[in-house]
Amino acid sequence: MRLRSLVPSRDAGMLMRPDFGLFGLHREIDRLFSEFSQGLSPNGQQLVPNIEIAETDKAIEVTAEMPGLERKDVDISIEDDTLTIRGEKKVEQSADGGKDKSDKNVQHSERSYGVFLRVLQLPPGIDPSSVQATMTNGVLKITIPKPAKPEPKKIEVKEAA
């Protein structure tokens, strides 16, 4: 999955450049079709939480930024040494009788809504029951204790009978 630039106007003014020309227009059309085929949301923004993975001596810590989401909007599961973070950011309901954003005449929006999924491969031997997750101010923190490393066992070589 290709991540988009965080700068909202990364291609702003490209069509206005004097050196853009016919081939530049062709490249821009190819880029638009490419992004469309990759399953972008209708407003052109992908809903992909930014994550950070850190490691200590005893645990792996995964932190994900999820502004605008609450704990009930996020599901976390571990199966076959794979961590899955799944969630949905819904269109906000207004306080004036439940009308949503679609009833408004929105002039411009850079916000993203929809379902997201992040899948991370974990080291083998993780105990799913020991994993803990907390969420504060739109930041999800998952703490995964590392499995105990087995001590090497020395095999004694015996005399053949």
Image (cartoon, rainbow, N blue to C red):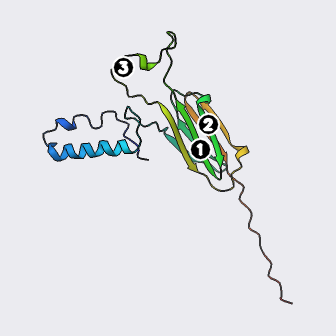
Q: Earlier in the sequence, mark 1 or mark 2?
A: 2
Say if mark 1 contacts mark 2, CB within 8 Å. Answer: yes
> Disc 1 residue type?
Thr
- What residue type is disc 2 on? Asp
- 133 w.r.t. 107: above or below: below
Asked if 119 appears above or below 116 in the picture, the reply is below
Going 68% across and 43% down the picture, which residue do you hit? 131
Q: Nearer the viewer, residue 17 or 157?
A: 17
Where disc 2 sits, the SS reads strand
Q: Which residue lies most toward the top here? A: 96
The x and y percentages for residue 127 are 71, 49
Q: Are marks 2 and 3 in contact (CB under 8 Å)?
A: no
**Residue 75, numbered circle:** 2
The numbered disc on residue 106 is 3
Decide: few, some or many residues near mark 2? Use Cα within 10 Å; few <14, some 14-19, many ≥20.
few
Amino acid identity at mark 3: Val
Contact between labelled residues 3 and 1, with CB atoms less than 8 Å apart: no
Instruction: Work out whether 25 lies above or below 12.
Output: below
Q: Is residue 142 left or right of residue 32?
A: right
> Which residue matches tag 1?
84
Q: CA distance from mark 2 to mark 3?
A: 30 Å
Task: Using the image, tell me which numbered label, if any, was put on residue 115.
Answer: none
| Residue ID at (44%, 31%) | 112
Residue 71 location, x and y as percent? 61, 29
Kind of element beneath mark 1? strand
Answer few, some or many: residues within 10 Å of disc 3's Cα (few below 14, many 20 plus, some between 14 and 19): few
Q: Earlier in the sequence, mark 2 or mark 3?
A: 2
Task: Give the x, y percent position of residue 136.
Answer: 59, 29
Residue 61 found in image quarter? top right
Q: Quadrant of residue 15?
A: top left
Nearer to us in this view, 106 or 56: 106
